[in-house]
Image: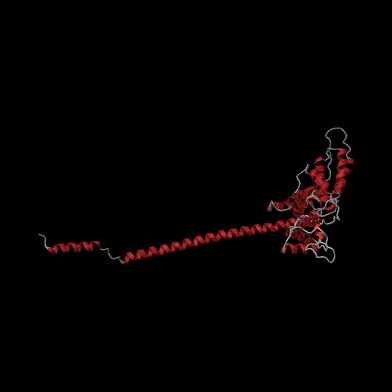
Amino acid sequence: MMPANHDDALISTSNQTLEAPEPTAKTRRIRLEFLILGAVGVILISGLLGSWLGYQAGLRDRLVEEENQKAIVAATQYQLGLVDLAAGRYDAARKRFEYVLTLKPDFPGGMDGLAQAMMGLTLQQTPTVTPSPTTQPTPDTRKEEELFAQIQQALLNQDWQLAIDTIEVLRKLNLTYRAVDVDGMYYLALRNLGVKNILEQGLLEVGIYNLTLAERFAPLDVDAQNYRIWARQYLSAASFWGVDWQRVVNYFAQIYPALPNLRDGSGMTATQRFRIASIKYADQLAAQGQYCEAQLHYENALSIAPDPQVQPTLEAVREWCANPPASEAPPTETPTPGSEMTPIPSETLTPTPEDTPTP
């Protein structure tokens, strides 16, 4: 038999084997170094990440600043180009507009300014006589040269109709004489005459026709296209005058903020038509008992210009909108002096006399 103290010795040895050894000073030092290295690594990574984000933000700010500088330079050169254009320095103007488009290809008015500068250079060119390689006599083009010079002068004077008339005479005389240059001058004259007829003369149909003819030679610029669109909308709105006041109001509400002085042959501007149509439409609404809607249109009309005749009607309609009457049927008879007054003056229920010419 084994002695009892032998078993106790085995148990004691097993317990000593299962217990973890105490860490030595060297082990603790190694662990501490790893912790320090890890902390340093985290700090370095954070610093690098912050530096990268700061670099990206600075790069974006620099790009934005560069775009702002480009916009300032482009605007300055554009204004100087307009000055050169007005002074007849077409070559300098051309260079400025080309530089503007290099900085910002979509700069407003840049392409139009460049086109005008190129046209001015064309007008300044002197005709060159190409010597004939044959022994045939050179055709006498003195009359054509004289007409061409007259066209140039008319364009410089902004006498667009005279330029067009002279171009037609030249074409009847010699259709092939400097055809490309003449086509360019024809476009310029038709385009500017169309804009003048629309904006200054009130000849909307004629102006639209001029621009349509100009479009046969080259695409219209954005301004000319917009003027033609507004002119067509004006004519469409005026066609409902006295027939459908709601449509008239809706159409001219879009036109008069953009071109308040646009007018047709009647001489009535878009603003005047909107004001009068608003009163007429408000009269209809008031007669139908729609007093709040009528109030809105009366106020729109009076916001453009005061009208002592309409002001009392507005006040009455405003009162009826705030305190609707028991009966929605509007009064149909004009009250006599001394009788009980109706909430709305009788004149608001009858159409306002038209003191302006119809289209």
Q: Is residue 257 left or right of residue 6?
A: right
Q: Image quadrant of residue 170?
A: top right
- Left or right side of 227 for 27: left
Q: Nearer the viewer, residue 168 or 131?
A: 168
Q: Quadrant of residue 61?
A: bottom right
Image coordinates for residue 151, horizontal then vertical, percent: 86, 46
Residue 124 can be seen, yes or no: no
Q: Is any part of residue 16 visible from this angle? A: yes
Q: Is residue 243 above or below residue 141?
A: below
Residue lying at the far left in this picture: please name it. 1
Q: In the rendered view, how is the structure colored?
A: secondary structure
Q: Position of residue 69 (x, y in %)?
A: 67, 59
Q: What residue is at 68 percent from the left and 57 percent from the top?
A: 71
**Residue furthest front as drawn:** 339
In the rendered image of this protein, does residue 226 appear above or below residue 35? above
Tell me which residue sits at (50%, 60%) in the image.
49
Q: Nearer the viewer, residue 324 or 9?
A: 324
